[in-house]
Image (cartoon, rainbow, N blue to C red):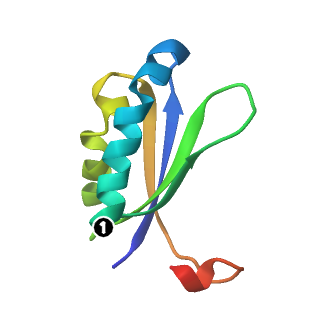
Amino acid sequence: MPYFATVYRYTDDDATRDEVRPSHRAYLDGLAEQGRLAVSGPYVGGERGGALLIFVAHDEAAALELSDDDPFVLQGLVEERTVREWEPVSGELSDHF
C-alpha cells in the first residue's frame, strides 16, 4: 500500500496545542497500531510550527481522511494540511517502509 507524506502547519495557539497534545498523540498511536501511520513527528525550530506524518493509505483522499479526526485538526490547531504520495527508495530507513 502506498505512503503519503502529510504536512501540518499549525496555528499560533501554542497553549491549546500543548493542552490537546496528549489526545493527539493517543490518536496517532491508534493509527500506528492499525498500520495506518508509519511515522510522525514535529518540525523543530523555524518560525512556524508544524509536523510531518507518513500515512499508509490507498490514495490521497484516504490519507487526508486519516487526519480528519486528529484532535489537533478537530480543535482547529492545524491551519493547513498538504498530502502527497511518497515513495521511499534509498537511505538508512528505506528498508523499513
Q: In the depicted view, which residue is nearer to us: 59 or 35? A: 35
Q: Position of residue 75 (x, y in %)?
A: 32, 22
Residue 90 vertical placement versus 77 (above, below): below
Residue 85, by quadrant, is bottom left
Residue ID at (56%, 48%): 41
- The residue singled out by tag 1 in the image is 57
Q: Position of residue 83 (x, y in %)?
A: 43, 52
For this orientation, the residue located farthest to the right is 45
- Taking the image as drawn, is residue 36 in sight? no
Residue ID at (54%, 17%): 14
Q: Position of residue 55 (x, y in %)?
A: 39, 61
Q: In the depicted view, which residue is nearer to us: 15 or 74? A: 15
Is 23 displayed left or right of 8 in the figure? left
Is 80 displayed left or right of 95 in the figure? left
Mark 1 residue type: Ala
Residue ID at (65%, 27%): 48
- Taking the image as drawn, is residue 23 in sight? yes
Q: Residues within 10 Å of mark 1 (few under 14, many from 20)?
A: many
Number of dots carrying numbers: 1
Q: In the depicted view, which residue is nearer to us: 9 or 38? A: 38
Residue 97 vertical placement versus 48 (above, below): below
Residue 57, by quadrant, is bottom left
Residue 69 vertical placement versus 63 (above, below): above
